[in-house]
Amino acid sequence: MKLEKLILHNFMAYKGDHEIDFGVSSHSPLILFLGENGHGKSTIQNACKWCLYDQTTEMPNSDLINRKAYAEQPNDPGLSMSVTLSWADEGKSYELFRSWEPNGKDSTNSHPILRIDGGNAVPANSVQDYVQRFLAKEISHFFFFDGETQKEFDAMATSKNGSGSIRSEIEKTLSIPVISDAVNWFKVKQAEESDALVKANKQNENIKKAGLALENERKLRNTLQEELNDQLVKLSEASKRIEAVEAELATMQESQELSEAIAGLRGEKTALATLRKEKFQFITDALSHNVFWAPLAIKLSAIQNQVVSQIEVTQKAFDENKEIATTIDYLHRIESNGFCPVCKSDHSQDKSKFVDEIARLRARIQATTQSDLTELEDKAKLFEQFSFNSDLYVDLRNIQKEYDSLGSELAKVENKIRDLEIKRGHSPSQDVQIAVSSLKNLMDDKTLATRNIEDYKENLAAADKRISKLESAVGKEISPEKRIAHNAFSYLLEIFESSKEVYVADVREQVQKYSSETFLKIISDKKYTGLRINENFGVELVLPDGRTDPLRSTGQGKVSTISLVSGLIKTAMDEGFILMDTPFVSLDIGHRAAVCKWASESGLKVSLFMHSGEFVWDRDSHYFQGHVGKIYRIEKIDDDESRVTLETL
Amino acid sequence: MSESNVALDLLLRAVIQQHRSNMLDPIADKSHTSIFTEQELSEIVRALWLDRYSDNRSNFQKTVGALITDKVSKA
C-alpha cells in the first residue's frame, strides 16, 4: 500500500485546503514534516485517522472543525470540514473523502465516500470494510507511530514478558488471531458436518433397515404374486372345468333327450315289428289255406268282380225292364182308355204321344232275361264253393302292402335310431347327479379362488404401497461422498491448527530478523548481536554468546520499539509505510542519527514528524544521506490556523 | 494491501509444508490428505489473508464453501 495524497479542509488548525503529496522516489523515500510543538504536526496523523476511522483523540467533530472557519460562517449550510486520503494498492487507486457539515442535515455523523479508480462511490456501509482491508484500525498504532504516546510499547519492549495489549496488536498485525479464528470456524463447520454425518449415518441406518425391509417386502410381494397367479390359474381351471362340466351336463341332457327319443323309436320299432309280424302271420295263414287259387287270385278276383258287376248290371237292367214294362202297361191303358186311370185326365186327343212313348220305351227294354241273371248268380256261387273271397284277397293284398309299408317304416325307424345313437355318441361316464355335484364343487372352488384373488390383490396393493414408501426412503440415502465435506473441514482444521504454531514461530522469527537488522543499524552499543523476541513478544537483547540481556535503558527501549515496529511492518505489509510522530523521544544524537539512517535504508516509506528540538536541517540532514524526498514545513499562523508548505530541497 | 507479503508467504509455506508432510506420512488418512491440492490450500490461505480484517470473513468462508461444495458435487 502506498500513500499518495492527503487533503485537509478546515480540519483542526488547517483552515481552508491544505494538500500533502506523499509521492517520493524509491531512492528518496523519506518525507520530513518539520514544525514546532503545537503547530499541527500531529494533526496530520489525526487527519489520516479521522478520515480512515472517523475517530481521533476522542474529540467530537464540532471540536475538530477549524475554529476560524466556523467563526466566519457559523450558520453557513455550506460550511464543512473534510479530509481526503488517497492511496494506491496493486495497481488501483483509492480515494477516501470524509466530511462533516455542522449545519448539514446530519450534523451528528461524518460521511465517508470511497472511490476506486475514480469510479462511482462504493456503498457507504462497505467503506469500513475496505478501510479495514488496507489499514485496519487495530493495527493503526504501528503505521501512525506516536513516539510520545508509545508508553505501552516501551513497557513491552522493556519487559521480558511483553505487554498484553501490545502483544494482542502485534498478533493482529501478524494475523495470528485470524488463523485462530479460521481454526475455530473449521471446528464449528466440522462439528456441523459431524452432526450431519451422525444424522446421515442414522438416516443411512434407517435407510439400510428400510432397504432390508424393502427386500423382505419385495419377497413377500413376489410370494403374493405367485400365490395370486396360482389362484388365477385355479380360477381359470375351475372356470374351464365348470365350462366342461356344464357342457357335459348340456351334452348329458341332450344325450338323455336322444336316449329318450331312441327309446321312443325303439318302442315304435318294436310295435312296427310286432304288427309286421302279425301281418306276416296273417299272410302266411291266408296263403297256407288258399294256396291253390293264390296264383290265380288276381284273375279270379277280376272275374269275380266282373260277375258281380254283371249281376248288378243285369239286375239293374232287369229291374229297369220291369219298370219300363209297368210304364208301357200304364201308357197302354191310357192309350186304350183315352184317360188316366189314376188321375182320370183325358188323353183322348194325344194318344199318339203315348204311342210314341210306348215305342220309345220298348226300344229301351234290354235283352235281359231271368236266365241271364240266374246264370250269373250261379257263377258267383262258384267262387263261394271255392272259398274264393276277393275281399279276402283284397285284404291280403292290402295286408301285403301294409306288411311292405311296415317294413319301410321299420327301416326308417331303425335308421333314425342309428342316427340318434351316432349323435348321442358314448354315454357320459357319470350320470347327471354326479355331474351336478361335481359342478357344485367346482363352483365352490371358483368362489373360493375369486375371494382369494380379491384378498391377494388387496394384499398386493398394500404391499405395493409399502414398497413405494420404502423405495422413496431408500432413495434418499446419503452417499459416502457426502463425507467429503466433513473430511475437508477436518483436514483444514488439522492443517491450520498445526500450521499456526509453525507460522507463529516463523513469523516471530521473521519479525525478530527484521527487528534485529533495524536494531543493529540503530543501536550504538555494538556488543549486541540482535534482538530476541519471545513468545509473548517481549524483547531482549542478544549477546554474542547467545545469552540475552533485558533492556536496561530508555534509549534501548525506544530503539527496540522502533526496531520492532519496523520488523512488524516489513513482515506484515508489502510496501509498508510508517508515519512517525516525534520518533526521537528519549534518543540521544547518536541514536537519532542511526534512526535517520535506518529510515533512509529501511525500504519502508517513512515520514518523520519532528520539531526543532529533534532535528535541525542544517545540522542533521546529512543523517539521511540524501534520501529525503520531501520536506513539509508546518507553521502556525495563529492559534486557530496553521499551514503546511512544501519546501524546496 | 498487497496480497503478497512476508507474513502471507510464511503462512503459505507453513500450510503447504504441513500438507506435504501429511501426504508423505504413511499413516495419514488418505481420505483427508487427498482432498485438497496445494493450489487449493493456497487459495484458501490467500482468501483468509484478504479477509483478515473483515468483520465476518464472509469471502473466506465462501471460498472454502465453494471449494468443498465443488468437491462434494464431483464425488
Image (spheres, rainbow, N blue to C red):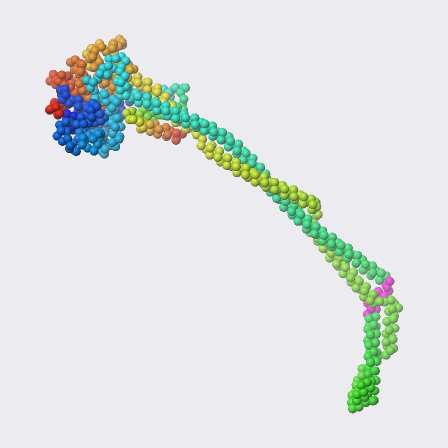
- Seen at 83% across and 59% down, the residue is A281
Query: In the image, is residue A278 above or below residue A183?
Result: below
Query: Relative to the observer, which residue lies in front, A631 or A26?
Result: A631
In percent of width and height, residue A640 lies at: 13, 25
Residue farthest along the right direction in this orientation: A385
Whether residue A463 is visible: yes
Query: In the image, is residue A273 above or below residue A216?
Result: below
Direction from residue A253 to residue B34 in the image, left or right: left
Magenta stretch contains residue A297: yes
Direction from residue A341 to residue A534 in the image, left or right: left
Whether residue A25 is visible: no
- Seen at 87% across and 66% down, the residue is A387
Residue A521 found in image quarter: top left
Query: In the image, is residue A370 above or below residue A477?
Result: below
Residue farthest along the bottom direction in this orientation: A349
Residue farthest along the front direction in this orientation: A75
Query: Relative to the observer, which residue lies in front, A320 or A144?
Result: A144
Direction from residue A63 to residue A411 in the image, left or right: right
Direction from residue A427 to residue A295 in the image, left or right: right
The magenta segment is A289-302
In percent of width and height, residue A342 lies at: 81, 85
Query: Relative to the observer, which residue lies in front, A484 or A37?
Result: A37
Query: Relative to the observer, which residue lies in front, A13 or A205?
Result: A13
In percent of width and height, residue A507 lies at: 28, 18
Q: Quadrant of the N terminus of chain A?
A: top left
Query: In the image, is residue A251 above or below residue A510?
Result: below
Q: Quadrant of the C terminus of chain A?
A: top left
Magenta stretch contains residue A89: no
- Seen at 39% across and 24% down, the residue is A191
Q: How many marks?
A: 0
